[in-house]
Image: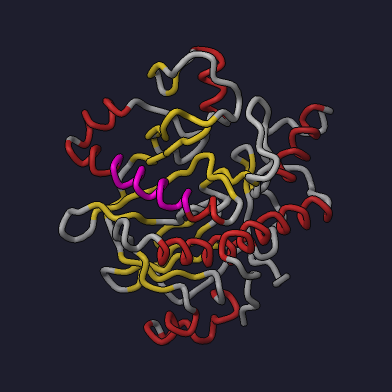
Amino acid sequence: MTTPLISCELPLPLWRRGKVREVYEVGADRLLMVATDRVSAFDVVMAEAVPDKGQVLTQLSAFWFDQLASVTRSHFISASTDEIIAMVPALDPFRDQIAGRATLVERTRPVQFECVVRGYLAGSAWGEYRQHGTLAGETLPPGLVESARMPAPIFSPATKAETGHDENVSFDRVRAELGTLADQLRDASQSLYDAGSAIAAERGIIIADTKFEFGLDSTGAPIVIDEILTPDSSRFWPAEGYRAGRPQPSFDKQPLRDWLAEERRKGRWNGNAPPPTLPDEVVAATSARYRDAYLRLTGHALPEFA
């Protein structure tokens, strides 16, 4: 495992600092996205970092951008440290901060909706269905159980929330705000999900649901941006042992969420910042989940970066 990175300081204008990524301006038409090893759960950023997490998110996204390039265009330019430094020489002294975790991308105008595709009934979708028989207010077939495969993948958009949880919204609302662009986003999202799910299935992984983000390029055309089909943006399940009617193990920060949920149940954490100190074994188990997802999907272990 590499030394975890909690934050970085680069000689570029900082455009945005998110829960995980720090984004810098590279001229007028490019951005540099740096995925740190910060980790959040229940909308609280932990004090501890998860080794290798940022590099997994960066390199797995690069893998998918390459695999799905024929499906829809993306903002991706390069996640190769050498190539990025060649294009932005001022970063050479900061190689240790960006190695394996930086992505150079085309700058776009982000679309203010999350484009979620759900192939299985889990998470907030299962909660709404169990209570109302709907998803984002739209009726689903009766008799579905937790983790059930949908009759067909469902486009389930959501609002982007700067704080707190995103809110599921109907496709009609998205179309009312975006017009025909909404149909383009839906079609592109479903095509990406279908193609990605087929590749993952060959590797023994079910993509239960995933979130795509889109931006408008200089011509006004939508292209996929940010990360894509990672453990942070998707729910990955092992196909082996899958059975509907129960929760499934997943290749993400489940060990962290499970531990925090137990701390809340026992009254040792109120669910707000500051979070409790994470045990070393929880951090290690979470890191292992991310690396395992990378290995299974790409077919090789996460490289060493220097």
Residue 262 falls in image quadrant: top right
Q: Which quadrant is the N terminus positioned in?
A: bottom right
In the image, is residue 291 part of the stretch drawn in magenta?
no
Q: Which quadrant is the C terminus positioned in?
A: bottom right
How would you classify the magenta stretch by its main secondary structure? helix
Drawn side of residue 220 relative to residue 286, left or right: left
In this rendering, the answer to whether 119 lies above or below 69 is: above
Q: Residue at x 70, y 40 (%)?
A: 241
Q: Nearer the viewer, residue 91 or 250?
A: 250
Drawn side of residue 247 relative to residue 55, left or right: right
Q: Residue at x 41, y 23 (%)?
A: 136
Drawn side of residue 294 relative to residue 261, left or right: left
Residue 239 falls in image quadrant: top right
Image location (x, y in percent) of residue 69: 34, 63
Image location (x, y in percent) of residue 207: 53, 45
Q: Residue at x 46, y 56 (%)?
A: 227
Image location (x, y in percent) of residue 115: 38, 41
Scheme of image coloration = secondary structure
Image location (x, y in percent) of residue 293: 63, 56
Residues in magenta, as a range = 186-198
In this rendering, the answer to whether 138 lies above or below 62 is: above
Residue 105 falls in image quadrant: bottom left
Q: Residue at x 28, y 26 (%)?
A: 173
Residue 14 visible in the current orientation? no
Residue 115 visible in the current orientation? yes
In the image, is residue 192 part of the stretch drawn in magenta?
yes
Q: Nearer the viewer, residue 10 or 49?
A: 49
Drawn side of residue 127 relative to residue 80, left or right: right
Q: Nearer the viewer, residue 61 or 200?
A: 200
How many marks on residues? 0
In this rendering, the answer to whether 247 lies above or below 57 is: above
